Each structure stands twice: as structure tokens, then as C-alpha cells.
Image: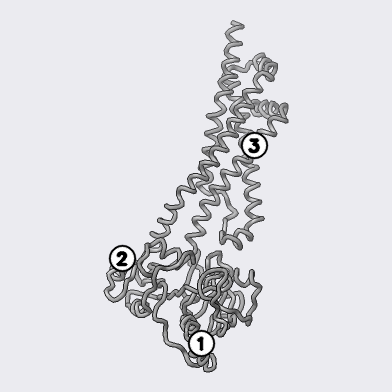
Amino acid sequence: MILLSVALHSLLSRKKTVILTFFSLTISIVVLLSIEHIRLQAKESFNRTISGVDLIVGAPSGQLNLLLYSVFRMGSPANNINYTSFTMLENRQLVDWAIPISLGDSHRGFRVVGTNNSYFTHYLYGKKEPLKFKQGSEFSSLFEVVIGSDVAKKLNYNLGDKIIIAHGIGNISFTKHEQAPFAISGILAPTGTPVDKSVHVSLGAIEAIHLSPIALKKLINNPETIPAVPKSITAIMLKLKSKFSTFRLQREINNYPTDRLMAVLPGVAMTELWSLMATVENLLRAIAVLVLISSLFGLSTMLLASMNERQTEIAVLRVLGAGPVTLLLLILLEAVILVSLAIIMSTLVLTLALFSLDAWLAAEFGLFLSNNIFTMELMRLISIIFIATLVVSLFPGIEAYKHALHSQLSKN
């Protein structure tokens, strides 16, 4: 306790340099903890995009590409698959449920997803959370549409509003299906996934808007006439009755003779995605570590520079009976106190920032970051910071030890 009191008074006697060092350490630790927390939470956020799907089926184009366009709505499929392949898989005894996905159209930059009502019944995200409607319900007629929460918010849409679907996935399209406006029947609650940025219509509607103008006009005049099922779709999401049959069905799908199909496991494809992102992750972490190391060396420099100023203080301590080891421990304790305060301030700043930016990050980037930063990974990181502090502080500590030892030998 006496050593702690001496260390605190010593730090308070050098307020200006200590405060500057404290802020330098705080900023570097905030950067390091932020990068690590966002990295871990972003990975979890991406992993929560889809849950409960055992296989994703599409045209052969690489498992990562299939995952990106079918789940994250990024990129475009190289080819479609036959609709008959969907009906075949849906009727398989091994399959619990199947969700068809048809892509290729858009509305003011938001992707249009052609599907059926099993999408709203079976699609899960996060920890197997189902889709919920903020307003309205699923589409029940041909020219009805269900929109995600981001679509409704950014375009200021309400139930009953009419929207026009355009061909292609760009923000600007010169081919719009103006003859067939869709009425909004439902608005989904926020999920923090690409569902929020999607416009959902029925497969029949996708087929209808691509009919000839004359056939489409007849269909509009006779809405009870349901068009034929589409010839092709983009992808299929499958949930199996037993996990043990996953690899068996995957092999059968990949060898399906009447259509070119490829089945991928979402978890495996997600692992490949993160392996590609590993370089960027490591670069960010390296930058944060370098910032921290520079701040720790700044701390060491501050302690070394204070040695000349503390000659009187050290002399008094020597008179009071403090040995070389005590002075070494004093320097190390000062460094630990300063870093501990910086860590406490960093965690407070980071927690407040997460609370403040929580809604914005979810709305803009679909990132649901936990406000609890005290995970095992971050606690391990804090432990490493303390170890690095002790290592760097050894240099000024040893200097103080040598000086005290030299004084002791001079007296003798």
C-alpha cells in the first residue's frame, strides 16, 4: 500500500507529461479494442444472416459465389437452374422444406427476390429467429409485394403504395415493368441482414412481368388467371430432416443427370469467405498493434526522461530504506497504474460509442454489435497489453535499479 501511494503521488507530481501519455495510451487501446471487437462481431453478424439452412443449391459457379448472390444479394449468378429441379428436391423424402430464390430484377437499387410464401415461414436468421412483419402480411395475390425495413425507411413506403419493378440490378434501369405495378402488402421488421434491403414478390409475378405486353395485359385484366410456373430460378435453400443425410444429398445433387446443379454447405462457404478476408483483418490488427507499441514506447520514454527530474525523490526513498528492487517495482507499478487507467477509460469510451452508434450501424451496415465488450478474446488482449507494458517498462525500471545500486555501492 505504501508503494502504491508513493507511485500515485509520483505520477501526480508530473501531471502534464502523465496526462499526455495517458491520452496517447487511451487512444491506442481504443483503436486496438475497437478493431478486435468489430472484427469478432462482424463475423458473428455475417454468420447470423442465415440460420437453419443445410444446403444451398444453384448453378455451378463456385461455392463462395453461390453464397454471395443467394444469401447476401451480392453479384449475379452465372446461370439459372430448372424449376423442375426445385420441385424434385422439394418432394424428396430427405427434405424438410425448400425455399426457391429467383433474382435478376430490382427496384431503385434494391434487389427483387422472387420466392413463395415458404420464405416467410421457414427463413431463419441469427439464433434461428423467424421473419416478422412490422406491418401487413405476406403477398396473397399476383401483384403484391413484401418489402424489407430498409426499403420502407429509405424510400418512405407504406402499406398499399405502388412500386414499379425494373429489369436488371443497377440503380438506374431503362427497362421498367410499368404495365404491372405492385402494391405493398407487407413490411418486414428489421433483421440486420440483406432481407432488410430486399423486395419480395412471388415466382408467378416474376414470370408475369416478363411476359409479352399483350399477354401481360390479358393477365392484368383477368388477375385470377395464374401464369405458368417459371422455367428457371436462381437458387434453392434446403432444410433436411436429418443432418446425417446432408453429404449424401449433396453428392446426389452434384451428380444430378438432368440439370447442372451444385449444392454447398453454408458454413463451409462462410469459412471460405472469412479466409479471403483474413488478409484485411490481419492488416487492421497489425496497424492497431503498431499504434499501441508506439504508445507503450512513449510511456517508456516518459519514465526514462523523468529519471533526472526524480533524483531528489529517489534519494529520499533511499534514505527511507528503499532498496534497488523497491525502486524497480515502483517504476513498474507506475506504468501498470497508468495503463490500467487507460484501459478503464478505453472500455468506457468504446462502450458508450457502441451504445450511441448501435442503431446507426444496424441500419447502415447491418452490423448488430454487442455492447458487452468483455469477451474472452478481449480479456486475453487486455492481458497481452499488461504483459507488453511490463516488458517495455523494464528499461526505465532497470535504469532506476542500476542508479540505486550505484548509489548504494558508493556509500559502501
Q: Amino acid at mark 3?
A: Ser
The residue tagged 3 is 24
Check disc 2 and report the residue beneath it: 247
Residue at 66% of width from left, 73% of height from top? Answer: 156
Q: 10 Å neighbourhood of mark 1: few (<14), some, or many (≥20)?
A: some
Q: CA distance from mark 3 to mark 2?
A: 53 Å
The answer to which of 11 and 284 lies nearer the viewer is 284
Rounded to the nearest angstrom, the CA distance separating label 1 from label 3 is 67 Å
Residue 233 falls left or right of residue 13: left
Q: Earlier in the sequence, mark 2 or mark 1?
A: 1
Task: Give the Cα separation between the discs numbered 2 and 1.
Answer: 45 Å
Residue nearest the viewer, comparing 181 with 247: 181
Q: Earlier in the sequence, mark 3 or mark 2?
A: 3
Q: Give the quadrant of the C terminus.
A: top right
On screen, 83 above or below 375?
below
Which type of secondary structure does the marked residue at label 1 adopt? helix
Q: Position of residue 132 (x, y in %)?
A: 55, 73
Q: Dot 2: what SS?
A: helix
Q: Is residue 127 visible?
A: no
Query: Which residue lies under the disc numbered 1?
Result: 213
Does residue 271 sit above or below 401 in this rendering? Answer: below
1 or 3: tag closer to the N-terminus? 3
